[in-house]
Amino acid sequence: MAAYATIFFTLVFQLVTLGSANKWEVAWQSSDINLIPPLPIAAPKSSNTQCREDSIRLIEALGNETLWAEQMWDASAKAPVGIISGSRYQMGDFDECLDVQVPVEAQYCLMDVKIKVPPGHNTTDPHMLYYDPNGSLWDKMYYRGSPFKIRIDEAKWALCVPASCSGEDIVSSIQDHLASINYTKITVNISPRMCSVKNRYYDQYFTSDIIFW
Ligand SMILES: *[C@@H]1O[C@H](CO)[C@@H](O)[C@H](O)[C@H]1NC(C)=O
Ligand SMILES: *[C@@H]1O[C@H](CO)[C@@H](O)[C@H](O)[C@H]1NC(C)=O
Ligand SMILES: *[C@@H]1O[C@H](CO)[C@@H](O)[C@H](O)[C@H]1NC(C)=O
Ligand SMILES: *[C@@H]1O[C@H](CO)[C@@H](O)[C@H](O)[C@H]1NC(C)=O
């Protein structure tokens, strides 16, 4: 009990000495605190009519917490976890995503995210294993082609998006969003083979089984 009270008063004291709680809130809201910020899962400006309509429907349904839409958002990666220690796959939830079939059919895509290291971080020894914890994140993030270094500037990012939208539709929606928040730390790409809809692979196996036998 006493320990909790001490922690509580320490926190309150720190908030007071910082001037105001607003500084904390600003920090959490800032997209700068995430290496990869939350990204849109819809393309409401797509030239593909079905994708555009499904996207608008999805955004409206997210606005009033409709279950199928929340499920698509819940199944998508939001903020990365473990990137610095080499967790490249931010997997979201595949089954939860593909469970959404009506009124919008969902597809699960694993997007390629490349984190852009700012210039000036190519000075350390490529074979270095120790990084100064007081130094810059980007010294560790910078990849020098060393086979001994785990590449941590690339990630696979799960998005649960309308099946009617192509990878390009989603990528261009994400690029518009990143431009609107002035976010330049990442580039994104979706390769078509990295998207799945429900039962697609079963269908393929089925066809090849018939040909085989
Ligand atoms: C959300 O809004 C839509 C359109 O206004 C409405 O049809 C739907 O019933 C609402 N859903 C919930 C869960 O409130
Ligand atoms: C680091 O990059 C700069 C240009 O961005 C280049 O001029 C310099 O030679 C590089 N240094 C090393 C050690 O690779
Ligand atoms: C990092 O900074 C802290 C506080 O300035 C210092 O106590 C610590 O020794 C530093 N660590 C290293 C590895 O330089
Ligand atoms: C983005 O940058 C432009 C130009 O520097 C600025 O006018 C605008 O307010 C910025 N937008 C945001 C959301 O920070």
Image (cartoon, rainbow, N blue to C red):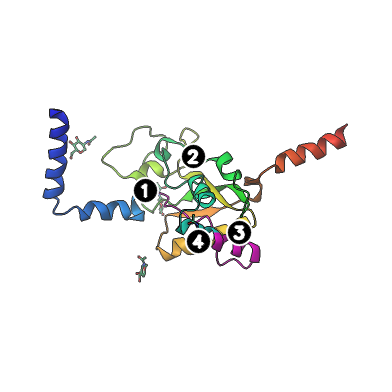
Instruction: State whether label 4 is within 8 Å of ligand 1.
Output: yes
Mark in the foreground, 1 or 4? 4
What is the secondary structure assignment of the residue under circle 3? Answer: helix
Residue designated by label 2: 88
Residue 169 at what x, y percent from top left? Answer: 59, 60
What is the secondary structure assignment of the residue under circle 4? Answer: helix
Mark in the foreground, 4 or 2? 4
* Depth order, front residue of 140/59: 59
User: Which label sits on residue 121?
Assistant: 1
Instruction: State whether label 2 is within 8 Å of ligand 2.
Output: no
Q: Does 3 appear in magenta?
A: no
Q: Is residue 205 left or right of residue 8?
A: right
Q: Label 4 amino acid?
A: Glu
Q: Earlier in the sequence, mark 3 or mark 1?
A: 1
Q: Which residues are magenta?
A: 34-57
Q: Gap between marks 4 and 2, in whole Å? A: 32 Å
Contact flag, marks 1 and 4 (Cβ < 8 Å): no
Q: Residue at x 41, y 37 (%)?
A: 82
Please tell me how crowded label 4 is: few (under 14), some (14-19), or many (20+) other residues with Cα within 10 Å: few
Q: Gap between marks 2 and 3, in whole Å? A: 22 Å
The overriding secondary structure of the stretch rendered in magenta is: loop
Q: Is residue 88 left or right of residue 129?
A: right
Residue 192 at what x, y percent from top left? Answer: 65, 51
Please tell me how crowded label 1 is: few (under 14), some (14-19), or many (20+) other residues with Cα within 10 Å: some
Q: Is residue 90 left or right of residue 53?
A: left
Contact flag, marks 2 and 3 (Cβ < 8 Å): no
Q: Gap between marks 3 and 1, in whole Å? A: 32 Å
Mark in the foreground, 2 or 3? 3
Residue designated by label 3: 168
